[in-house]
Image (spheres, rainbow, N blue to C red):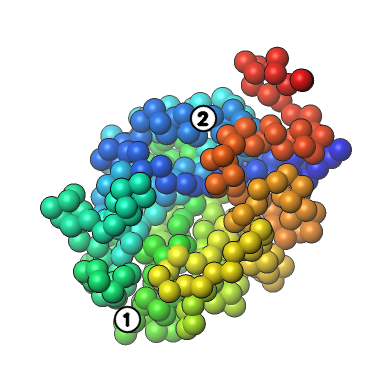
Amino acid sequence: MNSLLFSPLTLKSITFKNRIVISPMCQYSATDGFANDWHLVHLGSRAAGGAGLLIQEATAVSPEARISPEDLGLWKDEHIEKLQSINQFIKSQNAIPGIQLAHAGRKASVSAPWLGNKRLSENEGGWTTVAPSSIAYHENETAPIALDNQGIQKVLTDFQSATRRAVEAGYQVLEIHAAHGYLLHQFLSPLTNQRTDEYGGSFENRIRLTLETVTAVQAEWPSNLPLFVRISATDWAEGGWSVEESVQLSQILKEKGVDLIDVSSGGLVSHQKITIGPNYQVPFAEKIKKETGIPTGAVGMITEAHQAENILSESQADLVFFARESLRNPNLGLDFATALKETVAWPKQYERAKTR
């Protein structure tokens, strides 16, 4: 059988051996932004497990950009060395290493999920958060500081510097995180952006920082390597960012040289009302792909090989992203090949287990 899930895809100079992507998933296991052996095993096992592209968790472009104190970072050159070794292993498995660069904005300075996911004070190792407007995520929280022009310029400089380090670390795909209620998404949505300057109000003003971030990243990112942007297609909340705006933004990003839109949704406001079920976000990826022509990635409650194959055969997306299912099964790529009766290379160390 010649499945689409196991067909190659070429974007710019990079060819993915299949359409299986390991979504960026926070591990809350770093110290001062530094990767360690947990990250090597987490990403390395999924590369050995047959995925075509692995995107490293939301990696902070500055200390204050972290979601939690345990997030990975790329704000200093010392972070590069361990990431280089992880990427070398990923490449040794014929997989592509990617990175997601992020700034958490008002959703920063919280504890890891198993420590309650609660806002941390400075006495608890937290820090002052920033946002487009001084609006807290939860009503009982201290409101973030609204970024001034100098603060916005620092964000752009931080993204550009982190991109330079990402190149040195050997990543072959870079994704800008403009989803899930983090800083760029906060600028996109009128629910969190109540500015009256050139970064607020109109659609053109609200997308300005995202476009400027793309430009800042492109100043350092090689033009022959793929650049992705992850967006939340809808806020799932009245008066918020809409699917129609997502289509508009995706068209502009395509014209700016972005290669793929990774289409997620939600995460901006605590009162969102999401209708969750298998493939619940896939129609957003399909709409953006069909209305703009830009390649898209589908994500969200995609758990089975035939389900992923169908998304591709219906031309709803070009890549399929797996998050929680890949946490449950690091060998997802190898298992899906078996389910779709595809012959794929296994790590030679594991080949004796290929046939039962």
Q: 270 or 344: nearer the eye?
A: 270
In-image side of 166 versus 131 (left or right): right
Tell me the quarter of the image containing the C terminus: top right
Which residue occupies the extreme right position in the image? Answer: 1
Circle 1: element type: loop
- Rendering coords of residue 299 (x, y %): 60, 55
Asked whether residue 220 is in view, the answer is no
Q: 67 or 75: nearer the eye?
A: 67
Which quarter of the figure has residue 164? top left
Q: 36 or 151: nearer the eye?
A: 36
Asked whether residue 44 is in view, the answer is yes
Tell me the quarter of the image containing the N terminus: top right
Q: Is residue 291 above or below residue 315?
A: below
Residue 280, numbered circle: none
Q: Amino acid at mark 1?
A: Arg
In-image side of 244 versus 139 (left or right): right
Give the residue at x 34% y 82%. 194
Q: Is residue 140 above or below residue 103?
A: below
Give the residue at x 67% y 59%. 279
Q: Amino acid at mark 2?
A: Gly
Mark 2: few, some, or many residues within 10 Å (few <14, many ≥20)?
Answer: many
Which quarter of the figure has residue 345? top right
Residue 44, numbered circle: 2
Residue 195, numbered circle: 1
Give the residue at x 58% y 34%. 330
